[in-house]
Amino acid sequence: MSTTITQPASTLSLKEWAVAIKALGEGKQIITIRKGGLYEETRDFKLENDTFYLYPTYEHQKEEMVKPAYHADLNATLEGWSIDKPTVDILYFAQITDDVEILDEAKIRALDPYHIWTEDFADVRLKWKKKNPLHILFARVYKLNQPITLNIEEAYKGCKSWHNLLEDVPQNGFTPVLSDEEYASKRAEIMNILNA
């Protein structure tokens, strides 16, 4: 599964809860679950590119949607954060190796050991617009050698999944969060569930 990867050439970023980015960035999970932001042009999720930055969001994180084992991680993301904080730090980018669409509730339940979210979180995502599938995104995550601190622009706010960062992103190098072997092993386990 070893491929040549480069830091994203575009400034495209995906908004995700800070605690989920922390889990991805620490190799605790390799999947994220999407169905679309409230204000997407089509109200459906669409993978805009297979490589992009991970933009952390804080204000909509809900403790009851995160398993108790990860509450300390959630609290850690909120240290030093306030609604008025003028900047955000970008620490990671992701390369999506697989985008699997799923409507099967039993398979969603079977993914429980592989992510930080509660069953309620999965239920909310699955039951919103029931006819539309969930996207299980397999994310190979890379940590930037130098975090990028950006001013929080008005364009970054709101319930859209995607936006382009308004500043140039320096190319300072990066390190994979998981080795090729670790990622391939975790991916194979989850794929076995989805393909069962």
Image (tube, helix red, strand yellow):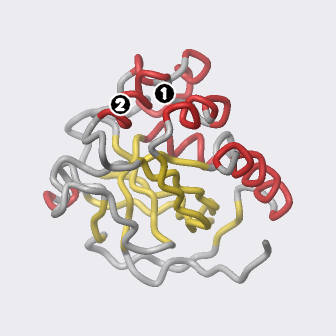
Determine whether label 1 and label 2 are within 8 Å by CB. Answer: yes
Q: Which quadrant: the C terminus? A: top right
Residue 123 x %, y %: 40, 27
Residue 61 x %, y %: 35, 30
Q: Is residue 12 left or right of residue 51?
A: left
Residue drawn at point x = 45 percent, y = 43 percent: 103
Q: Is residue 119 left or right of residue 181?
A: left
Task: Residue 61: give its label.
Answer: 2
- Nearest the viewer among 102 and 98 is 102
Task: Residue 115: give its label.
Answer: none
Q: The disc labelled 2 sits on which kind of residue?
A: Gln
Work out whether 102 lies above or below 139: above
Q: Quadrant of residue 138?
A: bottom right
Secondary structure under the numbered disc 2 in the rendered image: loop
Residue 49 x %, y %: 43, 74
Q: How far separated are the C-alphas under marks 1 and 2?
A: 8 Å
Residue drawn at point x = 65 percent, y = 69 percent: 174
Residue drawn at point x = 39 percent, y = 33 percent: 80
Work out whether 45 lies above or below 11: above
Work out whether 124 lies above or below 147: above
Residue drawn at point x = 42 percent, y = 47 percent: 134
Q: Which quadrant: the N terminus? A: bottom right
Query: Total label count?
Result: 2
Residue farthest to the right, as pictured: 181
Q: Earlier in the sequence, mark 1 or mark 2?
A: 2
How crowded pointer 1 is (Cα within 10 Å; few <14, some 14-19, many 20+) is rated as: many
Q: Which residue is mark 1?
A: 74
